[in-house]
Image (tube, rainbow, N blue to C red):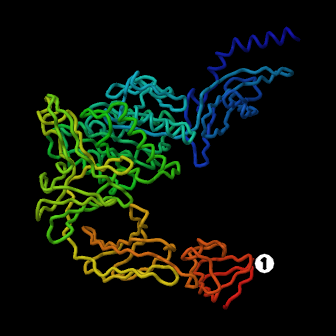
Amino acid sequence: MKVCYVALVCWLICQQASYAQRITFFKLPANGQLYPRNEQSVALVPIEGRIDTAGFERVSVQVFRNSSLYRQYSLPLSYSPTGSAPVALTTTIPAELAQYRVRIFLHSGVAGITDSLLIADRQRIVAGDAYVISGQSNATAYNAPPYYTYQSEYIRTFGVYTGFGEYNPADTLWAAGNGSSATLIGTWGMEMARRLTEQYRIPICIINGAAGGAPIQVLSARTDDDPMDLATNYGRLLYRVHKAGLTGRIKAYFYRQGENETSGWASGWMMNFDYLFNNVRRDYPNLRRFYLFQIHVLAGFAEATPGFRDYQRRLQSLQPLIRSHATVGTKAYDGIHFGVEGHQETGLEVFRLVARDFYGSTDTVQIISPDIKKAYYTSPARNELVMQFDEGQQLRWPGDTTVSDPYGDSVTHQLRQWLFLNKKAGAVVSGRVDGYRVILTLNGSRSEQDLGYLPPNYPTQDATQPTLPGFASAFPGPFLKNERGVRAFSFWNVPIGAPLPPLLSLAAKSETDGSVKLTWADHPTEQAYVLERRTSQEQAFSRLAALPLNATLYTDSTAQNQTSYQYRLRAVTTAAEALADVSIAVNCQPGGQLASLQSGDWYRARLWSCGMLPSPTAITQIMPRHVVTLHQHAWTKSIRLSGTLRLQPGGILRMGQ
């Protein structure tokens, strides 16, 4: 019997190659594959095939996590009259920094023999999230070793990066990203992925299909009856996504391009982008975000350049899927490209956006590029102008920038040089910042109707020619930034609103219950009001309330005792605003009126206005929808129940003095 057993095993080993030819897999993990995770943060790993060789009674599957057995399955085989047996199972793996291995065995049906035949062994399998990058050289962002060398076994890519080159459809292997130009992800893409894997412990796949120097009409070209046409850049990227099994599972698409058009077909960029974007939405189903980069200022001669840069800014307000990000002022800029430090800065900044949008990050303050919302003259004198950015931004007016031109001569630039009224510089004398508002002092009464920030080109010349004297080799700024160093978008042709009539008679009164009552005269042209507040310890105003047309009264019931406040009321139209402010100190006295600010326990001082517990001389009110619980003795002069008082065991309320 022993001799027979050895002979059978030897026969099985010799026939393994033959068996492999009779085993067909329709779905099977590839070495190094990343499977996209679902909402439960696990990935489905399907195994499907057909056994066309008789004599086997079952299939077994072993799943290893790192080097430890994680799961195992045993499936009986049922042969059809034609002599084939189907195999189908799905296992799951969690999205984590661990690598999985799948081994599949066939087991003989010979009586008394328990031999097995290994028919598949797949390793380094992970679950995680997948992203796509497209554009030209600043999307490629390749800093070759030794300048940038970071790699991770948990940051993957698929296929081969070819840029403009032909693509071999057989190139369908998974690999660690950025190991060579063939597995390129790009420096800022790697930096974003590095931070995601380190902070959220989830593997990342990035497929980069950018092409250095490519105009948008090349990148957007799509064969309608064959979107994966390998003759097009668009088709090559889509092919890689499809063969990776990531169709419908790409979380976000990053697009960084436009440098080519600054000395090319600038006026065509907008039309070509719309075509590209609509096709991306069609060919990448379930895409949840499209991140678009506004390009830096380059040398060039195209008058339309600031127009398409401004379109890159505005697209996020036109398309809900898009989030734009400014690259002006990024570090290590040489006039076209960026060094490692610049790409690392970009990687950090887009990581914050992705972490906010997909991973529940609470680091959301001032992570977006400041974006102008409106510009307007402040008075009929028209000698002062406000640039108003996103609420919550805390902007900084920069100092001068001094650099050398290519001929060794010193060049100094001021921000006011880069502010254009009706496309001409020279009207701005100085500027100051008030939170998210930049106030410009002008050189007299002005009548211009539009505003721009940053020049169309720097300098205005053919980018292939030597830089003109008096200009730096790369645009040096200075730049408007927020407190975290994120640079504001450049903009062009932003309308300047006419001044509004003044907002009058804003007054504040401290009530006996600790609230602050604000009143004002109705503004003659407002469309709405916004009320803001800050304490004497706070630098920035925060929005307190949005109020409707014709409102003239607001009561701030959240004011705290022993606190000084400054209130700012904004009369708002789509084109301009009028402001008024008033200050008041809240100083509640014992025995006054108290009102609940939220639900909670009676003996929690922060529950009550003024931050004080009700006393035997206080008039107490529980506000609508508030539920106040009482677990012990309490005493108040009187109580008004607009909400609910819930007496728990031991809770007794005494009223009267």
Q: Residue at x 11, y 33 (%)?
A: 469
**Res. 224 image quadrant:** top left
Can you say whether 639 is above or below 389 in the image?
A: below
**Between 98 and 62, which is closer to the camera in this rendering?**
98
Badge 1 marks a residue whose secondary structure is loop
Task: Please indicate, yes or no, whether residue 267 appears anywhere in the rendered image.
Answer: no
Q: Residue at x 76, y 24 (%)?
A: 107
**Between 526 and 634, which is closer to the camera in this rendering?**
634
Figure quadrant of the N terminus: top right
Of all residues shown, which one is farthest toward the right? 1
Can you say whether 10 is above or below 231 in the image?
A: above
Asked if residue 360 lies left or right of residue 15, the reply is left
Q: Disc 1 marks which residue?
A: 650
Residue 538, position in %: x, y? 42, 62
Residue 455, position in %: x, y? 18, 46
Q: Residue at x 51, y 32 (%)?
A: 155
For disc 1, the neighbor class at 10 Å (few under 14, some 14 to 19, many from 20) is few
